[in-house]
Image (cartoon, helix red, strand yellow):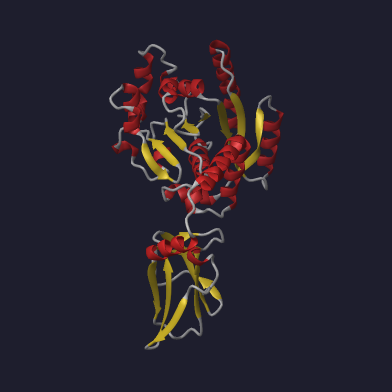
Amino acid sequence: MHIIAIVNQKGGCGKTTTAINLSATLGQQNARVLLIDMDPQGHASLGLGVAGAELAGLYELLKGEYRLDEVIQSGVTRGVDLIPGNISLAAAEHLLAERPDRDRQLAQHLATLEGRYDCVVLDCPPALGLLSVNALRAADRVVIPVEPSLYSLDGIERLRETIHLLASQYDIQPSVTLLANMFDVRTRIARNMFEMLESLPTDLCATRIRNSVRVREAACHGAPLTDHAPRAPVTGDFRELAEELLGSMLQRVRSEKAQAIEMQPDNPPAARKVDETHNLKEVVFRFDNTKFKRVQIAGEFNNWIPDDKDVETEIRDGSVQKKLRVSPGGYEYRLVIDGVWQQDPANPEATPNNMGEYNSLINV
């Protein structure tokens, strides 16, 4: 079980964004991930649409009021479970200070999860107190997000000193990696800052996370980038980061997934087809505007191919109807009216796409 601490005592450098989207990216690739929100602000919980303030979380676990299984929120996004954070964590420093092994409390809880998860991601608070020390002691790898500013660089040396002190005092050797975050390589300051990072005596990720409005949009929707903007370039950055940090683990997960599929009992193709057909739901789109010459529909349900063979078109009483059968779930789609791709004007539910426009949303 890999334990990764996302840490930097400076706020605003993208720790929570990194923790959420690294976790979601791993989960999308069939890894079993536990994300732990260690920040009293509870932003990792909020960023996944979970109201951490209303739930028992890490503080209640450390206090002994709840068992570990009781504070884990399962399936907050694909492959990812969450231990929420809330304002109660502001009192965690005082709570931990009175405990024996005060810097090992988190590690002791995580030891009971061995075999249940492939990876644990720790979203640390913006301070080098006992919560962060607990994370550093538990972690196999420490990732330090650095945004292009002098203030962000200033804290790196102090953080490196803290990690070195812990390593020498407790005989631990976590791998420490800097991550260039929110970088716009078109700006001179970002290029200069990256050169400074390369000169530091600490490993630097080859992957750089670009600055993108998609990140802020996803946070506002309470969703990771893998759900909100799966085809956005910044989402691809996090996929590269996951491969760079945990490529060997992901290869093992893929291998286990392939073996599991091979070991499944044969399911006759005819039986599969009957079962799949039984679960399909009919969806009908009706267009009463006869001013256009041609309307087509394309979306995730037909691989974005306008009016593919599975879309039936009927004209009744001057209206155009499009029928298709899909499995239950949520889908993005667009209309192609007289050759022009556009949002469905009759459907207010929409989400931004990577072309700077909007796709319509439908839940079946």
Vertical side of 267 occupied by 97: above or below: above
**Residue at position x 61%, y 38% from top?**
247
Residue 158 in picture, x, y percent from top left: 57, 21
Vertical side of 134 occupied by 13: above or below: below
Left or right position of 214 against 201: left
Residue 351 in picture, x, y percent from top left: 45, 59
Tell which of 286 and 33 is nearer to you: 33
Vertical side of 319 occupied by 147: above or below: above
Residue 243 in picture, x, y percent from top left: 61, 40
**Residue at position x 40%, y 74% from top?**
285
Residue 299 in picture, x, y percent from top left: 50, 66
**Residue at position x 68%, y 24% from top?**
201
The outermost residue toward the bottom is 317
Tell which of 236 and 252 is nearer to you: 252
How many marks can you see?
0
Is residue 350 among what the camera can see?
no
